[in-house]
Image (cartoon, rainbow, N blue to C red):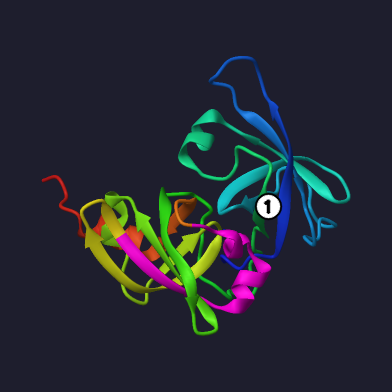
Amino acid sequence: MFTGIVAAVGRISRIEPLAAGSDAGVRLRIEAGDLDLSDVILGDSIAVQGACMTVVAFGEHHFDIDVSRESLSKTAGLDQPRAVNLEKAMRLGDRLGGHLVTGHVDGIGTVRHFAPVGESHELRVLAPRELAKFLAYKGSIVVNGVSLTVNAVRDVAEGCEFSINVIPHTLTVTTLGSLAVGDAVNLEIDLIARYVERMLAPQPS
């Protein structure tokens, strides 16, 4: 489990195929930036751009993860060298500064608008239609691993568009500041909303 509070911005520095063929996954080397790896061991979970990944090797300032072709097809931003948001899995007793996050990407959104509004930025993202029922005013959403609050939501022909106010601090300490219109982003819906939907769904008699 994670909190959606990004601990550091790292960078994908190396991408190596795990096997021959177009269906093979890749091994990524992540330069950890300011992320403290002193307590990391093999098998630990680290969220990379909001996707929970398993550490398969590490050094003093980097760690490696294996990403299957299936995971690559269901996420954005893990297929090329770039800056990435990083967060180690939370411990029991840690402060929950964001909200409960699983690191399981539910869909890929598209940035439709990103511009200054006062001292902050307004970010509008088009989410897939199947995620619309999980998005609500003042609800929680994870964008590229960052826990954020939905300020507005509206259904449109292409899916569901939600709006977020991104404060200057978040722009500084995450990769969100480099977003541009048309960029793909990883989305994770609120964990509680997921269970509420299941409980309210019609059950077979």
Q: Quadrant of the N terminus?
A: bottom right
Is 183 inside the magenta-drawn segment? no
Q: Nearer the viewer, residue 39 or 79?
A: 79
Q: Is residue 138 above or below residue 89?
A: below
Residue 158 relative to residue 108: left or right: left
List the single residue furthest toward the top.
Answer: 20
x and y, in percent, of residue 46 in the image: 66, 52
Can residue 42 be seen here? The reply is: no
x and y, in percent, of residue 103 in the image: 53, 53
**Mark 1, residues whose alpha carbon is within 10 Å: few (<14), some, or many (≥20)?**
many
Residue pictured at 80% horizontal, 62% vertical: 34
List the single residue furthest toward the right.
Answer: 60
Q: Is residue 113 above or below residue 40?
A: below
Which segment did they paint magenta?
161-180
List the single residue furthest toward the bottom.
Answer: 118
Residue 98 relative to residue 139: left or right: right
x and y, in percent, of residue 197 in the image: 27, 58
Find residue 171 and report its image quarter.
bottom right
List the single residue furthest toward the left.
Answer: 205
Residue 151 relative to residue 157: left or right: right
Identify the residue under disc 1: 83
Residue 57 relative to residue 15: left or right: right
Find residue 167 and report its image quarter.
bottom right
x and y, in percent, of residue 174 in the image: 64, 64
